[in-house]
């Protein structure tokens, strides 16, 4: 099961969004073992948004980039420790565990424990001074086989572990010399010793070597400590008791937290530069797992299919580190390189949605009515209702088929409704008009951009011209471009107007009629890629 994102270009237009949507449906149908997710790497333009609403389906979701995020390498569902578990619990875990493990309390993250903390604990225990142990009475049966004879009031205390192997007189003096009641005594079945320990309020007495019931006759009912009978011998009991200390005593309570949304490299560097073997990972404030250095040995690559574009500059950010699976497009070939052979279907048809339609036919997959309407929208948008010079017979045939399958009785009505959104320049944000369908190019040492917007009349262009020039200048400066153009296309009368900023030196060479400063008339020009771009490239090439 793999997640594969299908994305159109930046500043997505109708064809880009619709082809991603319809191709994802086809791929999911053909390969149900994968999940094909249509996405868009920019805002929906008004017309596309309105069209998906009209059809009554959710448009592809926004995806910021396809860079690898920490969340994809997080260890989830790994065995965890409970904060109250005895250290003993670590032993079966660490033999097959990563170098760190999460410590939880009722599902909530409490800390990390790595071999470093374990080492530190045992080194400290053996550092010279007699150690005091954090004893949890509840943990004793989890580690030492046996049973309670009596439970005292205190469950946890800090104190030394003492063995009562001495002659009684020596033992008495020894206990009296010990400070305070917080002692754990391991002793054989010896009545006098046990009584003395009770009298001294030793916190816990562990009796070893009891084979067939206690011989010592002691009444524990008034004793305030606990009494446990161990099935192990004294030496083994002592060894195991040291492992009954709870995990909370060893763990690192406050390691730096990582966020699942962090970039892979950022997280990798943070962990590598730290003293930690593992760090917990949170997402939206919730603990989701942890990472160790091993998680970063290989960078997983997001799987991506590009539709309606093939150039890196126009693609979703991070595409250079993604695994490109396929390209379905009808533009010129651009800059992308792939390490492996991939499926590329480029056909100079009127729209990518036409190519997707032909794929449904070729593969014998039925097109659901909603998907047919989506495909139809992409075709009539890109071909300006089959009027653009990019239109081919294949587009015409696809439209015919899609009208039938999508139960579209009148193509004209369907198209008019679609183009009615944003039909004039009135009330529209000039910056948005430039940026919504904006493509960047790098050619002949120039870095430039061309925006396009569709209207149903060009009569009001002069009214908004100055604001649009201002917007063009802003876009050029913000994106550090050499020049920017805006092509305003009248989809009804099949003409365009071109506004330019920063192109001055080349303007006289353009084959278009200059109507006023930086404004040109482009009769019959509907296609940016097939008509305007080649003209711009010609002018640049001729210098
Ligand atoms: Mn297209």
Image (cartoon, helix red, strand yellow):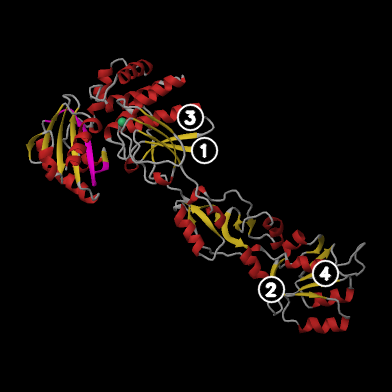
Task: Give the magenta part as a residue range.
Answer: 440-458
Where does the image place residue 159, in percent across and percent down from the top left?
Answer: 71, 74
Q: Are dots 4 and 3 in contact, CB under 8 Å? A: no
Q: First in sequence: mark 4 or mark 2? A: 2
Q: Secondary structure at mark 3?
A: helix
| Mark 2 to mark 1 CA distance (whole Å) | 49 Å
Where does the image place residue 522, in percent across and percent down from the top left?
Answer: 14, 31
Q: Residue furthest left?
A: 516
| Mark 4 to mark 2 CA distance (whole Å) | 18 Å
Task: Give the residue number, with chain letter if any, for mark 1.
Answer: 2
* Numbered mark located on residue 28 in the image: 3
In which quadrant will I find the N terminus?
A: top right
Task: Give the residue number, with chain letter if any, for mark 4.
Answer: 235
Task: Give the residue number, with chain letter if any, for mark 2.
Answer: 125
Where does the image place residue 335, in percent across and percent down from the top left?
Answer: 34, 41
User: Measuring 40% from the left and 45% from the top, which residue is drawn there?
Assistant: 320
| Mark 3 to mark 2 CA distance (whole Å) | 59 Å
Q: First in sequence: mark 4 or mark 1? A: 1
């Amino acid at each position: 099961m793999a997640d594969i994102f299908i994305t159109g270009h930046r500043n997505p237009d109708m064809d880009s969004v619709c082809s991603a949507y319809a191709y994802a449906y086809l791929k999911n149908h053909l390969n149900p073992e994968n999940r094909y997710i249509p996405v868009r790497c920019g805002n929906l333009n008004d017309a596309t948004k309105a069209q998906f609403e009209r059809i009554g389906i959710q448009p592809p979701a926004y995806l910021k980039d396809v860079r690898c995020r920490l969340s994809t390498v997080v260890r989830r569902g790994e065995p965890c420790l409970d904060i109250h578990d005895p250290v003993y619990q670590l032993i079966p875990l660490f033999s097959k565990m990563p170098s760190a493990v999460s410590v939880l309390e009722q599902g909530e993250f409490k800390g990390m424990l790595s071999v470093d903390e374990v080492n530190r604990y045992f080194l400290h225990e053996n550092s010279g001074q007699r150690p005091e142990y954090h004893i949890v009475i509840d943990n004793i049966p989890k580690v030492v086989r046996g049973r309670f004879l009596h439970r005292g009031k205190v469950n946890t205390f800090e104190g030394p572990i003492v063995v009562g192997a001495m002659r009684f007189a020596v033992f008495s003096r020894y206990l009296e010399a010990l400070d305070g009641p917080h002692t754990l005594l391991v002793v054989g079945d010896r009545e006098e010793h046990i009584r003395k320990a009770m009298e001294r309020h030793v916190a816990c007495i562990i009796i070893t070597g009891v084979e067939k019931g206690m011989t010592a006759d002691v009444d524990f009912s008034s004793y305030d400590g606990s009494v446990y009978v161990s099935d192990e011998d004294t030496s083994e009991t002592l060894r195991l008791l040291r492992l009954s200390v709870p995990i909370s005593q060893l763990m690192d309570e406050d390691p730096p937290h990582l966020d699942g949304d962090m970039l892979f490299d950022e997280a990798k560097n943070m962990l590598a530069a730290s003293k930690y073997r593992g760090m917990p990972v949170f997402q939206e404030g919730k603990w989701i797992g942890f990472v160790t250095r091993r998680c970063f040995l290989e960078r997983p690559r997001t799987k991506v299919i590009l539709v309606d574009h093939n150039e890196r500059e126009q693609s979703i950010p991070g595409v250079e580190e993604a695994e490109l699976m396929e390209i379905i497009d009808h533009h010129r070939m651009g800059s992308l390189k792939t390490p492996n052979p991939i499926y590329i279907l480029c056909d100079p048809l009127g729209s990518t949605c036409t190519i997707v339609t032909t794929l449904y036919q070729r593969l014998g997959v039925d097109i659901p009515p909603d998907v047919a309407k989506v495909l139809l929208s992409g075709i009539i948008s890109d071909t300006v209702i089959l009027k653009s010079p990019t239109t081919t017979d294949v587009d015409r045939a696809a439209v015919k088929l899609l009208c039938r399958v999508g139960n579209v009785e009148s193509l004209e009505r369907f198209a008019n409704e679609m183009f009615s959104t944003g039909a004039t320049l009135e009330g529209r944000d000039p910056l948005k008009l430039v940026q919504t369908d904006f493509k960047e190019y790098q050619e002949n040492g120039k870095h430039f951009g061309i925006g396009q917007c569709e209207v149903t009349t060009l009569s009001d262009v002069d009214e908004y011209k100055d604001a649009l020039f201002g917007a063009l200048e802003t876009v050029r400066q913000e994106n550090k471009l050499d020049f920017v153009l805006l092509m305003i296309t009248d989809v009804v009368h099949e003409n365009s107007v071109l506004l330019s900023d920063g192109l001055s030196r080349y303007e006289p060479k353009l084959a278009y009629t200059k109507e006023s400063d930086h404004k040109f008339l482009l009769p019959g020009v509907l296609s940016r890629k097939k008509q305007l771009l080649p003209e711009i490239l010609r002018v640049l090439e001729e210098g």
